[in-house]
Amino acid sequence: MESYVECMVARKPSTAMKALKIALIAIAVIGFVLGASGLIVFLIVAAAAAVGAYFAGLHSSLEYEYLYVDREITVDKILNKTRRKRVERFEVDRIEIMAPIHSWHLDSYKNREYKVTDYSCGVEEKPDLRYAVIYDGGRKIIFQPSIAMVRAIQSVAPRKVFSD
């Protein structure tokens, strides 16, 4: 039996990235104004700041799309609602445990060192809908699946997936 579930999560934009974008735009405008008076150095600085502002704006709007198909979870990153990039692929068979991020099921995994990857909204909300996945012994993946996705994964790995 093959199942298919997809879920989209928007990453909360960081204030640092917004501030950087605004600062770079201001530097670009000031550089172009001063460059118009004949100083070529200011035009170069303005062009570099404009390019920096473009990339800062591209990364300020970030969404993750999770796709579960036939015992496999893929994560895609969508930049500025225009560019899509496949980030990672996870096999359900290699998951040790999947539970809500503050679940008591994860207590025995707290004292281990993991490489943590966050594919969630990035902030703790009330109620916290994020899940932690201990993957392949050395990684902790944080993501925010829908209830339908949790149920689909739980149907193929009932001893590994908890929804408290």
Image (cartoon, grey):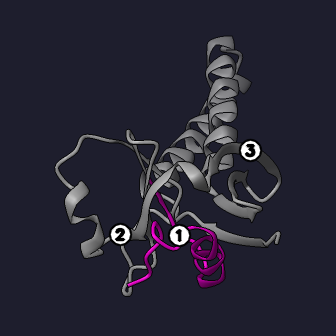
Mark 2 = which residue? 101
Secondary element at tag 2: loop
What's the residue type where badge 3 is placed? Answer: Arg
The image quadrant that residue 115 belongs to is top left
Q: Position of residue 82 (x, y in %)?
A: 83, 54
Judge whether 101 appears above or below 116 on screen: below
Q: Residue furthest top?
A: 40
Residue lying at 61% horizontally and 21% vertically, measured from the top left: 45
Q: How far apart are marks 2 and 1 (CA)?
A: 10 Å
Is residue 103 toward the left or the right of residue 65 in the image?
left
- Residue 8 point in image, percent of width and height: 69, 70
Q: In this view, does 98 lie to the left or right of 35?
A: left
Q: Nearer the viewer, residue 49 or 75?
A: 75
Picture disc at residue 86: 3
What's the residue type where badge 1 is placed?
Gln
Q: Is residue 120 above or below residue 35?
A: below
Q: x, y percentage for residue 13?
A: 52, 61
Structural distance between the alpha carbons of marks 1 and 3: 17 Å
What segment carries the magenta color? 141-164
